[in-house]
Structures are given as C-alpha cells and as structure tokens.
Amino acid sequence: MTLDYLFVHHFGGFKNDPYASSQWLTEEHLENAHQSRWPDFPSELNGSFIGYTIVIFPTYWKQFRYIGEELAANKGYNSRSVAIAIAGNFNLIGGKPIDTMTGTQKELFKQLAQAILDGKPESVGLKVKAGTEIKIPLAN
C-alpha cells in the first residue's frame, strides 16, 4: 500500500455549537464519539475506534492507528493517507481562532509531520503497518 496524502484535522466545535472550545476534549471523549459513529471499525494497532492515525493533545501525542491502516477521517482517501488531528477548535471568529495551538502542539506537529514526509516515521516512535510505502508529495 502506498500513502500519498497527509491530512491535518482539528476537533472543531460541536453539532449544537460549532464555535465551542474543544481543546479540553480527552481520548475518552474522542473514543466514545468515534465508536458511536463507527462501531465496527476498531484499530489493528490497539483496538481504539478513533479514526485518525495520530492525535496531538495540548501536552502530548498518541498514535491510534498504524500508518498504513485504513482510517475513518478522509472520505475517499482513508486507505491512501495519514491523518493527524490536533485537539482544539481552530475555526475563526472575527479573524481569531477559538482555541490556540499550544507551543507543545506546534512543536509535536512539526516533528511528526516532518518524519512522515521524510518517510522516516519510526524515527519519532510511530508504528507502520507492514508493506506500507510513504510517498507523500508536499502538494498533498
């Protein structure tokens, strides 16, 4: 399998309030939301139902699916991509984001994305599914 896309997501708000802060959401919140939406889609990596490859929380990151494992994040691209979700609602109100990425989130994103784009995800501790090839052009 060849991966040719890297997608970056954020948690956004909630159905009843798209402008609510969401940086405080935990793994448990995300797990419950994704399991209710995709109840028959546990991760091969750890049994989680979270559909992203990686989530960057305010002070740490965690991998929820192997790089190369099918995702539930990018309709039409779930078997060709890596998806990093960053905790927080970065929608804009009056030109300013609702939540602001922490310094830790910014640094972790740079490290993780660079390792993935360089085709060396193992160098930062990421796990890759056997037979996966990473060839993500910068345009993707």
Image: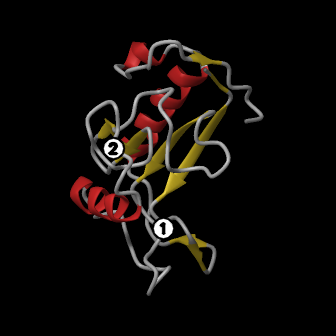
Which of the two labelled residues, at mark 1 and mark 2, occupies the earlier sequence position?
Answer: 1
What is the crowding at mark 2: few (fewer than 14 residues within 10 Å), some, or many (at least 20)? some
Q: Residue at x 50, y 79 (%)?
A: 18
Does 136 appear above or below 86? above
Q: Which residue is mark 1?
A: 12
17 or 93, which lies in front? 17
Where is residue 98? Give x, y as percent.
47, 72
Check the image and tell me how it is coloured: secondary structure
- In the image, taking residue 5 as reference, residue 106 lies left or right, namely left
Q: Is residue 115 above or below residue 29?
A: above
- Horizontal side, residue 78 vs residue 85: left or right: right
Point out the frontmost of discs 1 and 2.
2
Q: Residue at x 47, y 31 (%)?
A: 69
Q: Which residue is mark 2?
A: 42
Please identify the quarter of the rendering in which residue 116 is found: top right
Residue depicted at x 66% and y 34%: 5
Q: Residues within 10 Å of mark 1 (few under 14, many from 20)?
A: many
Identified by mark 1, the residue type is Gly
